Amino acid sequence: MPGASTARVAVLSVSLLCACAGWTRLALPSDTTLAPRQQVQVWSGSHARVLHAVRLSGDSLIGVPFQKPPSCDSCRIAIARSGVDSLRLGNMETPGIAGSALPFLLLAMLAAALSSMGD
């Protein structure tokens, strides 16, 4: 059945898109250095900022704003650990990339459905 294969492609595509999005809340121990490109959402009160090149010490969190290169030493900011409500790890770029692929997936499914109509 041609419709069944199109449905499988649709389910697989939606599943992959859903897996790409989101942030994961995490309690990180002191003296932790994350990968330079790992994005960390730092919540303090009702304000959140996204950093990368994050290093945690006993009393502070040091990182670079996501919009700046990880190597930017003059861009580094330090936040007291006592002022950090929570940390979430994630990726701001992946959902956008996956979302931009959605129209192409839909076109491919339409083309497959149309080509199977001629059979």
Image: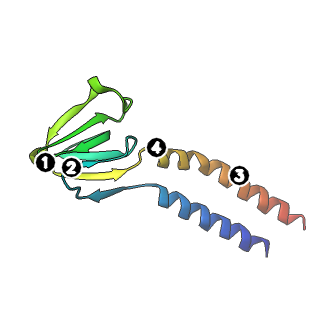
Gap between marks 2 and 1 measured at Cα: 7 Å
| For marks 2 and 1 on the same chain, the one whose residue lies earlier in the sequence | 2
Looking at the rendered structure, which numbered label has been put on residue 107? 3
Which numbered mark, 3 or 2, is in the foreground of this view? Answer: 2
The CA span between labels 3 and 1 is 52 Å
Relative to 119, does residue 42 appear above or below in the rendering? above
Which numbered disc, 4 or 1, marks the residue that appears first in the sequence?
1
Q: Quadrant of residue 4?
A: bottom right
**Cβ atoms at labels 4 and 2 below 8 Å apart:** no
Q: Read off the residue under disc 4.
A: 93
The secondary element bearing badge 3 is classed as: helix
Question: In the rendered structure, which disc, 4 or 2, sits on the residue that comes first in sequence?
Answer: 2
Which disc is residue 58 wearing? 1
Q: How is the image coloured?
A: rainbow
Residue nearer the viewer, 112 or 118: 112
Residue under label 2, please give it: 31
C-alpha separation, residue under disc 3 versus residue under disc 4: 23 Å
